[in-house]
Each structure stands twice: as C-alpha cells, then as structure tokens.
Image (cartoon, rainbow, N blue to C red):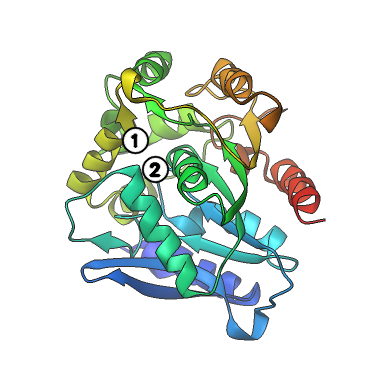
Amino acid sequence: MVKIFAAVVKPMVRVMMKAYGMKPKLVEIEPGTMIRFWIPCKSKTNPAKPNVVFLHGFATDGIFNWQSQVEALSGKYSVYVPDLLFFGASTTNKPERSMEFHAECLVKGLKSFGVEKFTVAGLSYGATLGFKMGKLYPEMVQCIVASGTAIELTESISRVSLQNIGYSSWSEFLMPDSTKGLTAFFSIASQKPPSLPEFAAKDFLKEFFGNRKERDELLKAWVINDNDVGPYNYSQKVYLLWGENDKIFKKQVAENIKRQLGEQANLEFIKDAGHLVHSDQASEYNQRLKNILASVNK
C-alpha cells in the first residue's frame, strides 16, 4: 500500500514551502535535544521583516498545521515554524516535559537563527506554550496570538473541557489509535472535518501519531493544579482569535481569558469555525492575523 502522506503529501508540502522561501533546519538545542524549524531560506532573509513564530496544536507537525499561514505571510514576514517536541523531527532524551522546558528549547532554537523579537501565534497546546514563552521571555515576545486554549490548563478547566466533548482524558481524545477515533477527533475539532478514505486515515495515524508515551507525558504536564496558577501579568498585547463554534474550549473560556487580562487582551470570534479555526476559516483567520501584525509592527 502506498504511504500517501510520506510518499505524496509531505513531498508536495515541501515543494510548496520551498516556493514560499522556506526550508527545514534541524537544531541541536543541547546534547540529546533536537528541534526542527522551518525557517526563511538564506536568500529570503531580511532583517527588516518582522518575525512570526507559529506553534501547532496536538496533532500533525508544524508545517502541515500552518501551511496556509506560511503561504499568506511569508512574503512580508520572516516566518518560523517549529515541530514541537515529539512531533515531526523534534525529540529529546531528557525526562523533562514541562511547559517551561519546552519554551526554553524553542527560544534557544530561535536565538540560534538570530531572532531577537517575534510575535507568537499558537493553537491549543501550542497557544498555552506561547503564553509561557511570553511570560518567561517578555523581552523577546512582542505579542501573543492565541486560539482554542487556556493561559494555563488547570484541572478545573480541563475537567469541563473534557466533559464538553465526552472524553475522560486528553490522551484518549488527542491520540486516537483507530480510524474511528481519528474521525471522532476531526468531527469535534473541526467545523469542516476532512473526509479520509480508510487507507488514508490509517496512514495518517501512522504518520502523525507516533511517540505516544512521550506525548502522553506532555499532556499530563499540560494540566496543572488550580492552586498552582500564578498571576496573569503580561507585558505584551494578547489577541484571542477564537472559533465561534469551538466545542473543546468554548466561547466562555475565551471570555474568561479576556476578563482575566482586561484591556491587555482583545477577543475576536470567527464565524463558522471550530477549534481548528486557522484551517476552518483560513482566509478570515489570515486576514485578522495580518491586521494584528500590522498594528504590532507599525
């Protein structure tokens, strides 16, 4: 059987990224820890271009997740798209799974490319990680754009969110091990779920849902005790771009974040979009993101 994603889809995406001036670069963060970034090709780098970093959610890899945004922004911005740890080509032999460790690894990688300041745009798990980067590195993170997430995923937020979708754990939902589970995942996460034939769905599972033990550890580290929540003080402006029909982190979660951050945050709902707002309504998401970046970098 042809491995459609490895043999067809990924090579096609790679060709597209080259056309947009992007190339993959594997960076050794420290011995035993490697992160793959998609970065601007040397011929396309321009110090005058503002930097944008995209952090993906808990499925696929960086460039597969954000290809529409790379297409829309790579002409005017220097775009960086990492694979998060244990996704794509990124890995570590360290036992650490915390958001702090993850954020430190990403920032070390960005510094290796000479990136000093950037806007971070994240989805779900990646957006929580973006908040952590903003808190730990306020001198580097100019702005945070977040979708379908929590600033910190507390046990109480986690419990309600899982009840919303009828699952007992994040691993059960975010790491399906059958085509039925994959179909259920997309039907909940997306307003426009893809229709994959059985053979393609099986290949998708093999291609994008590896490192299950390590990812389960990441998910467990994502959820924190309610009593461990610190003050939400951010020096950056925060923009919340939310799918109006997000079934996982519903509108009330976004409204609570806005309430907690006050005037520091701006909240926009995008119609006819679910949790995967960046793909459900890619054109609308991209336009709003362009507007945000224009205001940050004027």
Report the residue at 17% width, 61% height from top: 93
Q: Residues within 10 Å of mark 2 (few under 14, many from 20)?
A: many
Q: Secondary structure at mark 1?
A: helix
Q: Residue 170 sits in which quadrant? A: top left
- Quadrant location, the N terminus: bottom left
Q: Nearer the viewer, residue 157 or 176?
A: 157
* Relative to 25, 114 lies left or right: right
Q: Amino acid at mark 1?
A: Leu
Report the residue at 39% width, 28% height from top: 153
Tag 2 near tag 1, CB within 8 Å: yes
Q: Amino acid at mark 2?
A: Phe
Q: Which residue is mark 2?
A: 58
Q: Is residue 199 above or below residue 8?
A: above
Q: Secondary structure at mark 2?
A: loop
Q: Is residue 197 above or below residue 54?
A: above
**How many numbered discs, if any?**
2
* Relative to 3, 132 lies left or right: right
Q: Residues within 10 Å of mark 1 (few under 14, many from 20)?
A: many
Q: Position of residue 9 (x, y in %)?
A: 47, 63
- Quadrant location, the C terminus: bottom right
Q: Nearer the viewer, residue 230 or 49?
A: 230
Q: Residue 10 sits in which quadrant? A: bottom left
Q: Which residue is mark 1?
A: 174
* Relative to 178, 117 lies left or right: right
Query: If you read the primary sequence from the N terminus, does the residue marked by circle 2 or circle 1 appear first?
Result: 2
Q: Residue furthest bottom?
A: 43
Q: Is residue 270 visible?
A: no
